Amino acid sequence: MQTLIRRDTRAWRIQVWASFALACLLCASGLAALPGMALDRAFMVMGYAFCLTSTFVLAKFVRDTESRHDDSPLWRLVVWGSFALAMALTGWGLWRMEINPTWKAYLGVSWLYLVSSAFTLAKTLRDAWEADHAEACNCRAAPADTTPPL
């Protein structure tokens, strides 16, 4: 007996990728047009990149720990700590910048949109990988039907 393997619809996958691409575009355009010092812009670019990479690492870590618990406590601290540090430092950098509050709001919302769409993209990619893996296991485990046709 084969198990039912659920997959995301094509429309959902397109929406997730489009949302992530839009978030990247909004962040990039906001940072490129950011008024003020080049040092502030460089700090925010690094902060956004740090948040993005730590988001993907955290998403993978959380998903992996659902099925197994063999990670060391120090690794847990590194993963959660890097995500918290990335979010805190980027938020602090945004808060302390001497720019118009409208710019701060735009950068803040686009930053949070980037992080949330990255979590959604990571989940969608992992779901697809797990479905592919389950199908491969089902194909190997399913016995061949050797009964002659009627």
Image (spheres, rainbow, N blue to C red):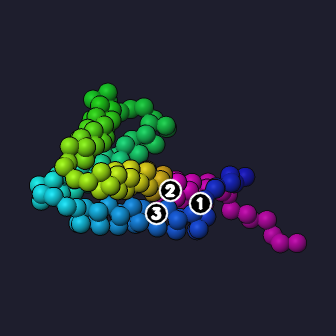
- From the viewer's perspective, is 26 left or right of 92? right
Label 1: state its secondary structure.
Answer: loop
Q: Residue at x 30, y 37 (%)?
A: 84
Amino acid type at image mark 3: Ser
> Residue 5: x percent and y percent?
64, 55
Counting residues from the N terminus, which is met first, the one under dot 1 or under dot 2? 1
Which x, y percent locates residue 140? 58, 58
Instruction: Identify which residue is drawn at 73% across, 63% down.
Output: 145
Q: Quadrant of residue 100?
A: bottom left
The quarter of the picture where residue 76 lies is top left
Which residue was labeled with disc 2? 124
Main SS of residues in magenta: helix
Near mark 1 (Cα within 10 A), the count class, few <14, some 14-19 or many ≥20, is few
Q: Nearer the viewer, mark 1 or mark 3?
A: 3
Q: Residue 19, labelled with which disc? A: 3
What separation in Å lies between label 1 and label 3 (alpha carbons)?
Answer: 16 Å
The answer to whether residue 113 is visible is yes
**Marks 1 & 2, CB-CB < 8 Å contact:** yes
Query: Does the magenta run of residues contain 138?
Result: yes
Instruction: Locate residue 95, reporting x and y percent.
Output: 25, 43
Q: Which residues are magenta?
A: 124-150
Q: Mark 2 or mark 3: which is in front? A: 3
Residue 104 in view in this figure = no
Q: Which residue is mark 1?
A: 8
